[in-house]
Image (cartoon, rainbow, N blue to C red):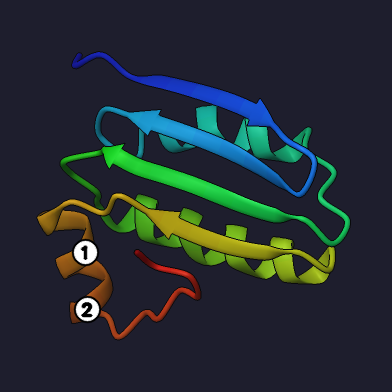
Amino acid sequence: MPSFAVHVSNQRNRIMISVAGELDFDTCPRITEVTDDVSLGDRTLCLDMAGVSFMDASGLTLLQSLNRNTEAQGGTLELSGLQEQPRRILELTATDAPGVT
């Protein structure tokens, strides 16, 4: 199994979650464990995906769920560092996540 890591940085106006490895059926639950413990309020949840070279349908579902949950808490989801393959998945599925950089 390829290595996978999740790092959380809790800042005043944002919570940064950095992910490294593949975002797939096996790894998505580890991100969910982290995000379920996060209370956003009106802060931004920034998911740094610079270390994610592959994302499958489970990863797409996770991002959509994070977006809904973040908005429900009054926050905003931002995706940063998207590599080519995950970005292409979002484009092909016409999934527009706010704050994608």
Label 2: how many residues lie within 10 Å, few (<14), some (14-19) or many (20+)? few
Residue 87: image tag: 1
Residue at numbered disc 2: 91
User: Dot 2 lies on which element?
Assistant: helix
* Residue 23 appears in the rendering: no
* Residue 15 appears in the rendering: yes
Residue 1: image tag: none
Asked if residue 1 is positioned above or below residue 63 in the image, the reply reads: above
Quadrant in which the C terminus is drawn: bottom left
User: Residue 15 at what x, y percent from top left?
Assistant: 67, 41
Q: Give, as a three-letter code, the residue at label 1.
A: Arg
Q: Position of 50 compared to 27: left or right? A: left
Asked if residue 31 is positioned above or below residue 88 in the image, the reply reads: above
In the image, 87 versus 14, the foreground residue is 14
User: Residue 90 at what x, y percent from top left?
Assistant: 27, 71
In the image, 18 versus 27, the foreground residue is 18
What residue lies at 38% left-to-right and 53% top-to-bottom? 80
Asked if residue 52 is positioned above or below residue 86 in the image, the reply reads: above
What residue lies at 80% left-to-right and 40% top-to-bottom? 12
- Quarter assignment of residue 49: top left
User: Dot 1 lies on which element?
Assistant: helix
